[in-house]
Amino acid sequence: MQGYKISTNTNHLDFEVIYGFISESYWASGIPKHTLKKAISNSFCFGIYDNYDSQVGFARLITDKATFAYLADVFIVESHRGKGLSKWLIENIVSHPDLQGLRRLMLATRDAHGLYTQYGFKPIENPEVLMQIWCPDVYRELKT
Protein backbone atom coordinates (compact mmCIF):
# COMPACT_ATOMS: atom_id res chain seq x y z
CA MET A 1 0.00 0.00 0.00
CA GLN A 2 1.70 3.14 -1.21
CA GLY A 3 2.49 5.62 1.54
CA TYR A 4 2.03 3.14 4.38
CA LYS A 5 3.86 0.29 6.05
CA ILE A 6 2.91 -2.51 8.44
CA SER A 7 5.23 -3.60 11.22
CA THR A 8 5.11 -6.16 14.01
CA ASN A 9 7.94 -4.39 15.85
CA THR A 10 6.45 -3.42 19.21
CA ASN A 11 9.08 -0.70 19.64
CA HIS A 12 7.27 1.28 16.93
CA LEU A 13 3.85 1.17 18.59
CA ASP A 14 2.47 4.53 19.70
CA PHE A 15 0.68 3.64 22.90
CA GLU A 16 -1.09 7.01 23.16
CA VAL A 17 -2.66 6.58 19.70
CA ILE A 18 -3.68 3.01 20.53
CA TYR A 19 -5.05 3.91 23.96
CA GLY A 20 -6.84 6.98 22.59
CA PHE A 21 -8.78 4.83 20.15
CA ILE A 22 -9.37 1.66 22.14
CA SER A 23 -10.39 3.39 25.38
CA GLU A 24 -13.21 5.06 23.42
CA SER A 25 -14.23 1.96 21.44
CA TYR A 26 -17.48 0.07 21.94
CA TRP A 27 -15.56 -3.07 22.93
CA ALA A 28 -13.16 -1.64 25.51
CA SER A 29 -14.54 1.70 26.60
CA GLY A 30 -12.79 2.92 29.71
CA ILE A 31 -10.05 0.30 29.72
CA PRO A 32 -7.36 1.33 32.21
CA LYS A 33 -3.99 2.21 30.69
CA HIS A 34 -2.13 -0.42 32.70
CA THR A 35 -4.56 -3.11 31.50
CA LEU A 36 -4.08 -2.20 27.85
CA LYS A 37 -0.28 -2.01 28.27
CA LYS A 38 -0.30 -5.51 29.75
CA ALA A 39 -2.55 -6.79 26.93
CA ILE A 40 -0.26 -5.34 24.26
CA SER A 41 2.92 -6.63 25.89
CA ASN A 42 1.48 -10.16 25.89
CA SER A 43 0.16 -10.09 22.32
CA PHE A 44 1.42 -10.34 18.76
CA CYS A 45 0.79 -6.82 17.47
CA PHE A 46 0.55 -5.23 14.03
CA GLY A 47 0.84 -1.48 13.50
CA ILE A 48 0.17 0.54 10.36
CA TYR A 49 2.23 3.70 9.87
CA ASP A 50 2.11 6.52 7.34
CA ASN A 51 5.05 8.16 5.54
CA TYR A 52 5.78 10.22 8.66
CA ASP A 53 5.91 7.07 10.85
CA SER A 54 2.70 8.12 12.60
CA GLN A 55 0.59 5.20 13.71
CA VAL A 56 -2.72 5.07 11.85
CA GLY A 57 -3.87 1.51 12.52
CA PHE A 58 -3.49 -1.41 14.88
CA ALA A 59 -4.45 -5.00 15.56
CA ARG A 60 -3.31 -7.56 18.08
CA LEU A 61 -3.54 -11.30 18.36
CA ILE A 62 -3.66 -13.33 21.53
CA THR A 63 -1.88 -16.44 20.29
CA ASP A 64 0.51 -19.31 20.89
CA LYS A 65 1.50 -19.02 17.18
CA ALA A 66 0.99 -22.77 16.82
CA THR A 67 -2.65 -23.76 17.30
CA PHE A 68 -4.85 -20.78 18.18
CA ALA A 69 -5.20 -17.02 17.81
CA TYR A 70 -7.82 -14.49 18.80
CA LEU A 71 -7.84 -11.26 16.78
CA ALA A 72 -8.65 -8.17 18.82
CA ASP A 73 -8.50 -4.38 18.93
CA VAL A 74 -8.48 -3.83 15.17
CA PHE A 75 -8.78 -0.21 14.10
CA ILE A 76 -7.83 2.42 11.54
CA VAL A 77 -7.91 6.03 12.73
CA GLU A 78 -10.76 8.03 11.21
CA SER A 79 -8.60 10.29 9.03
CA HIS A 80 -7.08 7.29 7.21
CA ARG A 81 -10.24 5.25 6.58
CA GLY A 82 -11.55 4.54 3.10
CA LYS A 83 -8.11 3.74 1.67
CA GLY A 84 -8.23 -0.05 1.97
CA LEU A 85 -5.97 -0.12 5.04
CA SER A 86 -8.21 -2.45 7.05
CA LYS A 87 -8.25 -4.95 4.19
CA TRP A 88 -4.49 -4.68 3.82
CA LEU A 89 -4.04 -5.18 7.57
CA ILE A 90 -6.24 -8.30 7.75
CA GLU A 91 -4.61 -9.71 4.61
CA ASN A 92 -1.19 -9.27 6.25
CA ILE A 93 -2.37 -10.89 9.46
CA VAL A 94 -3.94 -13.99 7.91
CA SER A 95 -0.94 -14.52 5.61
CA HIS A 96 1.77 -13.86 8.22
CA PRO A 97 4.27 -16.76 8.38
CA ASP A 98 4.02 -17.01 12.18
CA LEU A 99 0.26 -17.59 11.94
CA GLN A 100 0.16 -20.38 9.37
CA GLY A 101 -1.16 -23.79 10.39
CA LEU A 102 -3.38 -22.52 13.20
CA ARG A 103 -6.30 -24.77 13.96
CA ARG A 104 -8.52 -21.83 14.93
CA LEU A 105 -8.40 -18.06 14.41
CA MET A 106 -11.29 -16.25 16.07
CA LEU A 107 -12.60 -12.75 16.57
CA ALA A 108 -15.67 -10.94 17.76
CA THR A 109 -17.15 -7.97 15.92
CA ARG A 110 -20.35 -6.01 16.11
CA ASP A 111 -20.10 -4.25 12.78
CA ALA A 112 -17.30 -5.49 10.47
CA HIS A 113 -18.53 -8.89 9.31
CA GLY A 114 -18.18 -7.87 5.65
CA LEU A 115 -14.48 -7.16 6.08
CA TYR A 116 -13.63 -10.39 7.85
CA THR A 117 -15.64 -12.72 5.62
CA GLN A 118 -13.41 -11.63 2.71
CA TYR A 119 -10.52 -13.35 4.51
CA GLY A 120 -12.22 -16.61 5.42
CA PHE A 121 -13.89 -15.81 8.73
CA LYS A 122 -17.32 -17.41 9.16
CA PRO A 123 -19.95 -17.49 11.89
CA ILE A 124 -19.35 -20.15 14.53
CA GLU A 125 -20.90 -23.39 13.25
CA ASN A 126 -21.37 -24.99 16.66
CA PRO A 127 -21.67 -22.12 19.14
CA GLU A 128 -22.95 -24.57 21.75
CA VAL A 129 -19.40 -25.96 22.17
CA LEU A 130 -18.00 -22.56 23.16
CA MET A 131 -18.22 -21.17 26.66
CA GLN A 132 -17.07 -17.96 28.26
CA ILE A 133 -16.80 -15.96 31.42
CA TRP A 134 -17.99 -12.52 30.34
CA CYS A 135 -17.60 -9.43 32.51
CA PRO A 136 -18.72 -6.50 30.33
CA ASP A 137 -18.39 -3.96 33.16
CA VAL A 138 -14.97 -5.07 34.40
CA TYR A 139 -13.25 -1.78 33.51
CA ARG A 140 -15.81 0.24 35.44
CA GLU A 141 -15.52 -2.14 38.38
CA LEU A 142 -11.71 -1.82 38.39
CA LYS A 143 -12.00 1.96 38.90
CA THR A 144 -14.07 1.69 42.07
Image (spheres, rainbow, N blue to C red):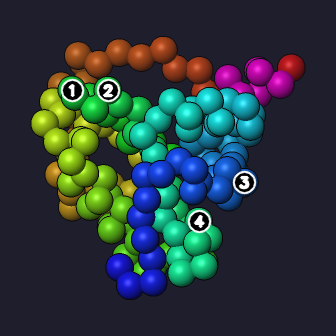
Q: x, y (%) of residue 135?
A: 59, 20
Q: Main secondary structure of the magenta part?
A: helix
Q: x, y (%) of residue 87?
A: 33, 67
Residue marked by disc 2: 64
Residue found at x 65% / y 56%? 14
| Mark with earlier residue (3, 1) | 3
Is 142 a magenta residue? yes
Amino acid found under the numbered disc labelled 4: Gln
Residue found at x 13% / y 36%? 101
Q: Are marks 2 and 1 in contact (CB under 8 Å)?
A: yes
On the question of residue 77 being in view, the answer is no
Amino acid found under the numbered disc labelled 2: Asp
Q: Find the distance from the CA under tag 2 to the CA under tag 3.
A: 26 Å
Q: Residues within 10 Å of mark 4 (few under 14, many from 20)?
A: many
| Mark with earlier residue (2, 3) | 3
Q: Which one is in front, 84 or 40?
A: 40
Residue 51 appears in which quarter of the rendering? bottom right
Residue marked by disc 1: 67
Amino acid found under the numbered disc labelled 1: Thr
On the question of residue 97 being in view, the answer is yes
Q: Find the distance from the CA under tag 4 to the CA under tag 2.
A: 26 Å
Amino acid found under the numbered disc labelled 3: Glu
Dot 2: what SS? loop
Dot 4: what SS? strand
Q: Are marks 3 and 4 in contact (CB under 8 Å)?
A: no
Dot 1: what SS? loop
Residue marked by disc 3: 16
Residue marked by disc 4: 55
Residue found at x 76% / y 28%? 140
| Mark with earlier residue (4, 1) | 4
Q: Magenta segment, which residues?
A: 138-143
